[in-house]
Image: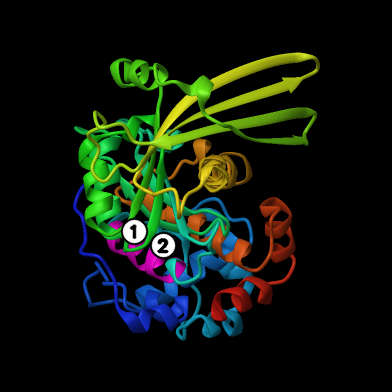
């Protein structure tokens, strides 16, 4: 079963400058001390390198470690010979996945990029369908930095809960001071907005027809008399025009710190066929820090979490067919995939599939990548 326990935030000033391997070395070891041959941090480091080389499960990680040889493994902190698949399988099933994700988030946060002058984080959920086994498949909520594509955190949704409280737990683990958080319509909730502003951040929340009353109220605003900012992009056989209109928030909008509301019209033309989608936005960012063009950029960049994380894990890593199902192992493996994606993106690899093949051809490549990150 996925863990529902939340670890305390891992925020230490020194960690912003530490290498990833140094942070992994401080992970608590769930194993009994007797008979332990390898440090837990070194085993995680081996697994990260194997995933960077394209490994999708424990068998492939064990094979990578065996082929790497003792000299390569010593560079990662394994000084007493190789490591087998069963050792990794038992460890990852019991590893504190909350703590691991928090550690990885601290490391990634210091390496995020700015979007229109602000650090912007997208939050969204994904089900790991292949890990269903005999129970509910784990549903994981992740935070992704716009621009850099680095994964800042991840948390499992309790089997008896849903994505909304899980996302709030994840936000509490992040340092939101000065950060903009973008979320889809599911998370357009008063408590979520209050959490973000209370932590010193700003939110950009989407309103769709699933919130009928609020949607109709926003729709009734005099948008026809409000000037628009329009941008057209072409690519992948389609033309996309985004038109945004922004006004100061009406008094009847009760979201904490709300400063502006917007209408966003997205028109897509492909092979002569046109589709139009209209959504509304509520944001706590004011007109000075979030003029229409900036707000539109933040909203467009939100979908990086779908295209640059969820899609990559599904298609490149074939996550939905993963047979890793025991204990915390599915979530740990998802965290390793997140880390591999982040490592590769930070080193300029936009095509993750090609990057995996590149690092699979030389054992030193993933090790060098990790030891300098």
Residues at marks 2 and 1, CA–CA distance in whole angstroms:
6 Å
The residue labelled by disc 2 is 88
Can you say whether 167 is above or below 22 in the image?
above
Towards the viewer: 108 or 182: 182
Towards the viewer: 198 or 252: 252
Can you say whether 300 is above or below 19 in the image?
above
Extreme residue toward the front, this view:
225
Main secondary structure found in the magenta portion: helix
Q: Residue at x 61, y 39 (%)?
A: 315
Q: Which mark is residue 308?
A: none
Quadrant assignment, res 101: bottom left
Quadrant assignment, res 51: bottom right
Q: Residue at x 57, y 60 (%)?
A: 148
Q: Residue at x 62, y 63 (%)?
A: 344
> Is 259 situated left or right of 313 in this image?
left
Q: Where is residue 186 in the image (x, y as percent from the top left)?
A: 34, 30
Towards the viewer: 357 or 86: 357
> Is 29 situated left or right of 227 in this image?
left
Magenta segment, which residues? Answer: 95-108
- Assess whether mark 1 and mark 2 are in contact (beta carbons under 8 angstroms): yes
Q: Residues within 10 Å of mark 2 (few under 14, many from 20)?
A: many
């Amino acid at each position: 079963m996925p863990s529902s326990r939340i670890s305390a935030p891992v925020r230490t000033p020194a960690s912003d400058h530490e290498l990833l391997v140094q942070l992994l070395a401080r992970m608590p070891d769930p194993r009994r001390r007797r008979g332990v041959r390898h440090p837990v941090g070194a085993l995680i480091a081996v697994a990260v390198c194997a995933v960077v080389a394209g490994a999708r499960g424990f068998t492939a990680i064990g094979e990578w470690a065996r082929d790497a040889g003792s000299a390569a493994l010593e560079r990662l902190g394994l000084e007493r010979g190789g490591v087998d698949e069963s050792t990794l399988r038992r460890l990852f099933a019991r590893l504190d996945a909350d703590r691991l994700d928090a550690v990885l988030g601290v490391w990634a946060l210091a390496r995020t990029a700015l979007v229109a002058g602000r650090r912007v984080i997208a939050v969204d959920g994904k089900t790991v369908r292949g890990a269903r086994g005999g129970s509910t498949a784990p549903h994981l909520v992740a935070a992704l930095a716009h621009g850099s594509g680095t994964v800042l955190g991840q948390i499992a949704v309790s089997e008896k809960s849903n994505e909304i409280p899980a996302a709030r737990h994840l936000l509490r683990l992040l340092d939101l001071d000065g950060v903009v958080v973008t979320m889809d319509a599911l998370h357009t909730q008063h408590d979520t907005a209050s959490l973000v502003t209370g932590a010193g951040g700003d939110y950009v929340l989407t309103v769709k027809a699933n919130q009928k009353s609020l949607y109709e109220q926003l729709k009734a605003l005099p948008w026809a008399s409000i000037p628009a900012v329009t941008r057209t992009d072409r690519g992948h056989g389609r033309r996309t025009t985004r038109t945004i209109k922004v006004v100061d928030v009406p008094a009847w909008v009760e979201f904490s710190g709300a400063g502006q509301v917007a209408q966003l019209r997205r028109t897509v033309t492909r092979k002569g066929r046109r589709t139009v989608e209209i959504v509304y936005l509520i944001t706590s960012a004011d007109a000075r820090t979030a003029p229409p063009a900036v707000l539109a950029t933040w909203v467009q960049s939100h979908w990086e979490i779908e295209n640059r994380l969820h899609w990559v894990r599904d298609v490149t890593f074939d996550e939905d067919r993963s047979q890793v199902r025991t204990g915390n192992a599915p979530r740990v493996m998802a965290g390793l995939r997140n880390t591999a994606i982040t490592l590769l993106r930070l080193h300029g690899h936009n095509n993750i599939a090609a990057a995996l093949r590149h690092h699979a051809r030389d054992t030193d490549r993933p090790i060098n990548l990790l030891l300098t990150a």
